[in-house]
Amino acid sequence: MLRLTTGSAQILFLPREERIVIQRDGSCSDDDVNVDTEHGKHTLFQTVGGWEKLKLCVLYDNGILEIFANERFALSTRLYGGICRAQAVVDNNAGEVSTRFWTPRP
């Protein structure tokens, strides 16, 4: 499992379930705002050389969170409140994890 924390949401990759999940219940406490979990199916391919690596591109801009995986999966949602800070948490079997952050110029 891979978990990215973005301040008011968590992004999970569940390889056994072949799912990418955005848990955004922490993004707003207003009962009238829908903060249900968003999810979509994403399968890593197995080839002669082994399993495909998961490559995520996560973009956050003015409350919109977009996730792109392996150039064939996309999921976007709205987050309410909070500051976007990314933190990767992986289990012992997740393999290598690297991150790169882009900071816009003022």
Image (tube, rainbow, N blue to C red):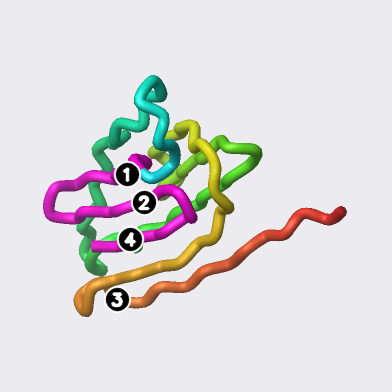
Secondary element at image label 2:
strand
- The reply to whether callout 1 and callout 2 are in contact (CB within 8 Å) is yes
Q: Residue at x 29, y 76 (%)?
A: 95
Q: Which residues are magenta?
A: 1-25
| Cα–Cα gap, marks 3 and 4 | 13 Å
Q: Compared with residue 56, is residue 32 higher up or lower down, i.e. above or below?
A: above
Residue holding disc 2 = 11
Q: Amino acid at mark 1?
A: Gln
Q: Residue at x 51, y 36 (%)?
A: 80
Of circles 3 and 1, which is in front? 1
| Cα–Cα gap, marks 1 and 4 | 10 Å
Of circles 3 and 4, which is in front? 4
| Cα–Cα gap, marks 2 and 4 | 5 Å
Residue holding disc 3 = 95
Of circles 1 and 4, which is in front? 1
Quadrant where the N terminus lies?
Answer: bottom left
Q: Residues within 10 Å of mark 2 (few under 14, many from 20)?
A: many
Q: Which label was assigned to residue 23?
A: 1
Which circle's residue, 2 or 3, is located before the other in the chain? 2
Q: Amino acid at mark 3?
A: Gly
Secondary element at image label 3:
loop
Farthest left residue? 16
Of circles 2 and 3, which is in front? 2
- The reply to whether callout 2 and callout 4 are in contact (CB within 8 Å) is yes
Q: Which label was assigned to residue 101?
A: none
Q: Amino acid at mark 2?
A: Ile
Q: Which label was assigned to residue 3?
A: 4
As for residue 98 lying within the magenta part, the answer is no
Q: Compared with residue 28, is residue 52 higher up or lower down, i.e. above or below?
A: below
Secondary element at image label 1:
strand
